[in-house]
Structure formats: structure tokens, C-alpha cells
Image (tube, grey):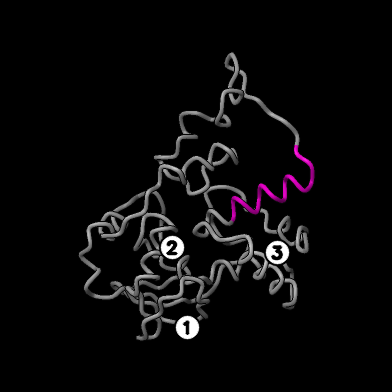
Amino acid sequence: MLIYKMSKQYKIDRTIGQNILGRAKSPINKRNYKPGMHGNVHGKIATRSLTTYGEQLKERKKICHYFGKMRAKKIKTLTALAIRQKGASDNNLCQLLESLLSNIVYKAKWAMTPFAARQLVNHGHILVNSKKVDIWSYRVKVGDKVTLHDYMRNNSDVMIAQGSTERNIPEYLKMTGFTLEVMALPTISSAQYPGPMRFNLLVAAHGR
């Protein structure tokens, strides 16, 4: 059984002010204000302007959370790589994050959340080109085939994720049963998220 306690993970939605994963269970759907005694006083939602660094930090937390509660060190490494690559750095970063194996598993709807998808990979339930890969941050390439191990296909958590209507499998993943082929990697303009992702702020903040 895949176990991941989500109660604490939902709290960041109210802190950030966005339903990061687009889930119906998010508390921000009912309490659209920051947590704490000063988050909502007499029906007025407390707001404050952020500095440029504050906006960058907020965006980094949101993106790290969306891609499976990634550590700041990992996102900095990927940002540095995106900057070194040819082309727009923010688009490069988007594609690097989208290529993470745990993200591909999440987008395939084999897990309800990015955290559960990361757990699936870490426990050795995923094959890439017929070989077991248990590194969640492994980066898949166009043409790779990713498979969910056959003994996990009737797992209750996997079946719940498969039946969920909260999100759809993106068109760039060609699904054949429990095997997918990565046909392309999305760009900033084609990637779909529950809310805006400002990868450019992470690029601008690199080096802090």
C-alpha cells in the first residue's frame, strides 16, 4: 500500500494562496486566506505586498511542492543546468522539471499526488525501457517507454488515481495499457498546471 500523509502538505496552499495541485481536498477551496489568527480578521483577508525576493521565494516553494516537495538544493541544480543550456532558460527549466520520472508517473495518473508518484518510483515499481529505475529525479527522454510493474496494476491506490477526474493525461504521453511512451516534453506555453508557474522568477533568483 502506498502511504503518504497529506494533511500537512495541503497547508502550503493557504500559505501560497493557490490550490497548487488543483485538488478538491485543498482547504483553500473553503478558506481562501492565509492560516493563522491574522489571516482573516472580521471577514477581511489579510494581504501584504512582497519584495522581489519574497515573490521569488514564494514561487520556488510552490514549484518545489508541485514537483513532489523537491528540496531547494535540487531546484537550484536544475536551474543552473537550465541556464547553461541553449534557448530560453525558463523554458529549459520547465522541460527539465517535466522530464523527472516522478512527474511522468504522476502525469500518467498512476498516483493521485506527486508525492505518491515519487514513492512509487523510490520503491522500485517503475520500469524505464524495461529496466527498473528507483531514482525519482531520473530524467526521461523523448522516445523512452515507462511502465508500471505488473504486480502494482491492481493496487487500490493506483486504481483510485486511474479513476480520478481531477486531471487528464497529457497528449504528449502515448498510453498503451500501463506503458507510456514520451512523445515530447511540454514547453511553458503547452504545459498545463492548475495555476500559473513563473519559472522565470527561479531563473532570476539563481545564485541567491
Q: Looking at the image, do the residues carrying marks 3 and 1 touch, with CB atoms under 8 Å apart?
A: no
Disc 3 or 1, which lies upstream in sequence? 3
| Secondary structure, magenta segment, majority class | helix
| Residue 123 x, y percent position in the rendering | 35, 70
* Residue 55 on the magenta span: yes
Number of numbered callouts drawn = 3
- Residue drawn 65% across and 70% down? 78
Disc 1 marks which amino acid?
Answer: Gly
Disc 3 or 2, which lies upstream in sequence? 3
- Residue drawn 55% across and 72% down? 185
**Quarter of the image holding residue 1?**
bottom left
Q: Give the labeled residue for mark 2.
A: 107
Q: Give the labeled residue for mark 3.
A: 90
- Residue drawn 22% across and 57% down? 156
| Residue 134 x, y percent position in the rendering | 41, 76
Q: Residues within 10 Å of mark 2 (few under 14, many from 20)?
A: many
**Quarter of the image holding residue 161?**
bottom left
| Residue 48 x, y percent position in the rendering | 72, 31
Task: State left or right for residue 79 relative to residue 128.
Answer: right
> What whole-number distance in Å separates the C-alpha atoms at marks 1 and 2?
16 Å
- Secondary element type, mark 1: loop
Q: Give the labeled residue for mark 1.
A: 143
Disc 2 marks which amino acid?
Answer: Lys
